[in-house]
Image (spheres, rainbow, N blue to C red):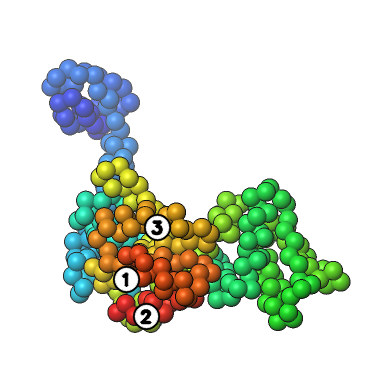
Amino acid sequence: MAIIRCNKCTLLQEQPDTLAGQSIPCPRCANLSVVYPTLFYVEKLLDKYFVAQKELVRLREVSSVVTTATSTQAVPSMPMADIDLGNTNHLASEIQHGPIYDWFRKRQIKVQANMRNVDTSGFFDEIAEAIGANLEILREVVERICWSQQKGHASALIHLGKKKPEEAAAISTFCQSLYDFSFVAKCFHNKPDKNIRLVLQTAPAIRHFFNGEWLEWHALMTSLRYAKERGRRFSCSRGLEVALQNGSSYELDVFMLIDGQTPICIECKSGEFRQDIDHYLTLKKRLGIVSKNFVMCVAGLSDENARAFSAMYDLTFTNERSLADHLSHLF
């Protein structure tokens, strides 16, 4: 037998197979309705059922995390000992971001996270940590690449003639890593002329990385290693979009929620930052984060100036080196 399903009065009734594929008046309300072959109708019904089941499971998982996030015992705990922080996509999930969404929801703030921003399966984190660990020597390379990209040049030339042997060796190794990890298209070591020519990549992700996102990756990895070393439960996000009720919008470079309730916000600046201080003071007040947990990480900032600025403003200033030390004193 075939099946008629009326969209107007919801009648479901068997019909002769000879009517399958035809439109006939509904026996109850006379609305023109299609008669479906039984097998076709059941297959479509099952497709919708399984789709609904998958969505229900996903919503239950997210709801479970969000509902229990305020309890330190209920915050999702990842088996951190089994996760390679520098090579995992475990953090790039709605479940991992659940407590962060809940924390902002309770403050009537809308947020949107890009899951890929905390996916460390690629090489962004490795290169960022290399830069952060040796910025004094490698900064010239990063800035030269950034400048060349902004000017639309196809390559960047790194001069080694006036460098100390150990500095030249470190730069050469770093440039080779950029090529090995596809951050540049080609790397030519010209030993007679003591320079390195880097043929640049034009992909937006690479451009953004050298234009300052490397510091965000460095801050993220520093925070993750801090949390793992101390066995803390956490949720983390990078580039979190925040929309306040007054229409103001912000992007939080690195946001971490420790044990489901203690926020740490890290704003990263690889260039000029002074004109943004008032902006971040306003944001810090709106989020209700204490000054020690709202960090301005400024690349290359001297330790002395970091201490002075922290004393002047209701914010905490660090550089790429002292960030880890500051985090170690928070808890």
- Give residue 179's position: percent from left, percent from top: 68, 65
Displayed quadrant of residue 190: bottom right
Q: Nearer the viewer, residue 194 or 20?
A: 194
Q: Give amino acid for label 1.
A: Lys
Q: Nearer the viewer, residue 85 or 315?
A: 315
Q: Give the quadrant of the N terminus.
A: top left
Q: Could one spot residue 309 in this view of the protein?
A: yes
**From the viewer's perspective, is 11 left or right of 203?**
left
Q: Secondary structure at mark 1?
A: helix
Please state which amino acid type lies under the numbered disc 3: Ile
Sequence order check, earlier mark of 1 and 3: 3
Q: Residue at x 24, y 23 (%)?
A: 33
Contact, CB < 8 Å: mark 1 with mark 3? no
Say which element carries label 2. helix
Q: Which residue is mark 2?
A: 328
Report the amino acid beneath label 2: Ser
State the mark number for residue 277: 3
Residue 141 lies, in percent from the top left, at: 66, 65
Whole-number angstrom distance, CA of label 1 to CA of label 3: 15 Å
Query: Few, some or many C-alpha atoms within 10 Å of disc 1 (few <14, some 14-19, many ≥20)?
Result: some
Residue where numbered disc 1 is placed: 292
Numbered disc in front, either 1 or 3? 3
> Left or right: where does residue 184 sit relative to residue 100?
right
- Give the residue at x 24% y 31%: 3
Give the mark count.
3
Position of 257 relative to 49 (above/below): below
Question: What is the x, y in percent for residue 134?
Answer: 59, 75
Classify residue 243 as left or right of residue 261.
right
Q: Is residue 52 left or right of residue 253?
A: left
Residue drawn where x is 41% and y is 74% of the image: 307
Element carrying mark 3: helix
Please indicate, yes or no, whether residue 92 appears anywhere in the rendered image. Answer: no
